[in-house]
Image (spheres, helix red, strand yellow):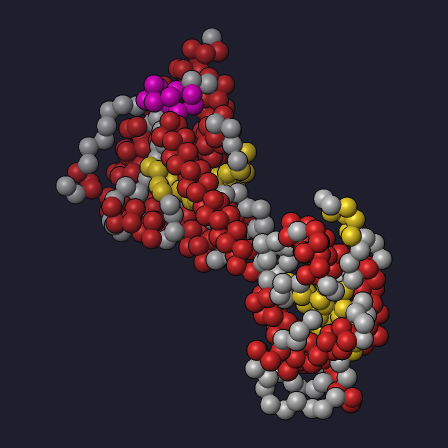
Amino acid sequence: MRNNEIQTPNLVWDRAGVFNRVDNDRELLLEILGLFKEDFPPALAALRSAVQSADLQASSALSHKLKGMLSNLGGVAAAAAASRLESFASAKDAHSLPDALAALERESQDLVHELDAYLVEVHG
Amino acid sequence: MNILIADDEALSRRLLEKTLERAGYDVVAVENGKQALEILTAQDAPRLALLDWVMPEVDGPSVCRAVRKRTDHTYIYMLLLTSKGSKEEIVRGLEAGADDYLTKPFDAEELRARLRVGERILLLEDRLVEARENMRFRATHDPLTSLLNRGAVLDLLGRELQRSRRENTSTAILLGDIDHFKLVNDTYGHIVGDEVLGEIANRLLNSVRSYDFVGRYGGEEFLVVLNSCDPNYGSSRAEEIRKSISITPIQTAKGSITVTMSFGILQTADWGPRSLEDLLHETDTALYEAKAAGRDCLRIARPATRQEVLAPVAPALLRHKR
C-alpha cells in the first residue's frame, strides 16, 4: 500500500485513550489541553507557511511535531492526517502537500471543537 | 531513581514528566538533544534516559551514540521514543546504542514496565561492577592486612621509578622487617601474630602521605615507597616510622606486646639508572645490615660504601636470613 492510500481513521478524539495516558487525572488533562491550545496554532501556522513555500524539510519536521502533539492528546484522525503529510514531505512529494494540509486543518478543527465541548462540560 | 526526559514537544514532555513522577522517579526534563547530552555525560548523570527520536540540534540516536562512546562512564539505560515504527528504523535506533524503544503515543503502563526492565538491567550491571572491583582488590591486596600485595607494590614502584627519572626527582625505598617475629608466633600463637601484622600495617599506612605506597612484601616484611622526596625527608620519615612501631606496644587478645622493626632505606637519586631488582637488592642489604647492627634501627644504602653490583641479581639471592 502506498502512503497516500492510507485511510484516515474516523475517531476525532480518543477520550478514553487520553484519560488512560494521564492516569485519569483531570487536572493534568486540563493542563495539557492548555499547552495544546498554546502550542498548536503557531505550529500549524508554521506548517502552513512551509507547505506554501514548498519547503519539504520544514514541512516534514513540523508535521512530525504536530503528529506527536496530536497523538499524545488522542487526536487520532488529525494525527493520522499529520502523519500523511509528513510521509509526503519525506518522499519529496510537494504536489500532494496542499491537499494533505487541508485534510489536517479539517481534522484539527474537528478535534478543537471536541476539546472545546469537553472544556464546557468540565467548567460548565 | 533519577531519569532524564528529552523531548522538544512541551505537551509530550509534560505528560512523560507527570507519569514518571507518579511512578516515583526524580525527573530531569530537557527540550533538545544537546541539553540531554550535556546532562548524560556529566558526573552523576541519571542512569535512565527517555529520549525522543526526532529533536532539534541532536536527535535521539545521536545522543545514544555519543553516550556509548564514553567507556569511562557508568552504564546508562536509554529508551528511544519514536513514532517511527518500521523494523529498519528500530534496528537503527538500537544499533545507535539505545537499549529499548517505545512507540508514540506511549501507554503509561507499558512505559513503567519497560523502565522497570531498565532498572533490573542497571542493578545487574552494578552487581557485576562490584564483583569486578572486589576481584581487582583481591588480586592486588594482601587478604590479612589489606595492604598492596608484593606484585602490586612492585608494579607501582616500577612506575614510580620511571616517573621519578623522567621528572628528575628521588624516591625513597624502605624495606622493613619485624624483629624476632617467629618468637611472637611461637609464644602467642599465629592468631596474635596476625593481629600484630595487621596493627603494623595500620601504623605504616598512617605514617605516610596519601600518595606514598605501602605493601606487604613477604611474611613479616613490608615495603614502603615514599614518592618525590628529598634524602633528608626520606631518612627522617623512615626513622619516625620505626619509632611509631617500637614506642607504643601493640594490644592483642593476649595482652600488649612490644614489637620492633629493622629498616633498610635507599634513595634512588643516589644510585643512578639502576634496575628495580638492583635497587631492591641494595635496600635488602641495608636491611640486613640493620639486623646485624642489633635490630630496631635503620641503615641507609649508599653506593660509595658498597661495591658496585653490575650483574643483575637473581631473585633467589635477594633473600637474607633475618
Is residue B76 something that shows in the picture? no
Residue B233 picture quarter: bottom right
Q: Where is residue B306 in the image (x, y as percent from the top left)?
A: 74, 88
x, y percentage for residue B87? 24, 46
Residue placed most toward the observer, B86 or B113: B113
Q: Give the farthest residue toward the front.
A: B187
Comparing B58 with A101, the one in front is B58
Determine the residue positioned at 72% across, 85% down: B271
The quadrant the C terminus of chain B occupies is: bottom right
Left or right? Give the position of B215 relative to B297.
Answer: left
Residue B59 is covered by the magenta coloring: no
Is A73 placed left or right of B171 in the picture?
left
Main secondary structure of the magenta stretch: helix
For the point 24% across and 24% down, the residue is A10
Tell me which segment is drawn in magenta.
A14-23
- How many circles with numbers are drawn on the protein? 0
Residue B239 lies in quadrant: bottom right
Residue B290: in sight, yes or no? Answer: yes
Q: Which of B262 and B271 is in front in this view?
A: B262
Relative to B211, does residue A108 appear above or below in the rendering? above
- When the figure is inspected, residue B252 is found, relative to residue B242, above or below; the finding is above
Q: Is residue B219 above or below residue B30?
A: below
Q: Is B144 left or right of A74, judged from the image as shown?
A: right
Q: Where is residue A41 in the image (x, y as percent from the top left)?
A: 44, 33
Which residue is located at x 38 percent, y 31 percent? B113
Residue B261, quarter of the rendered image: bottom right
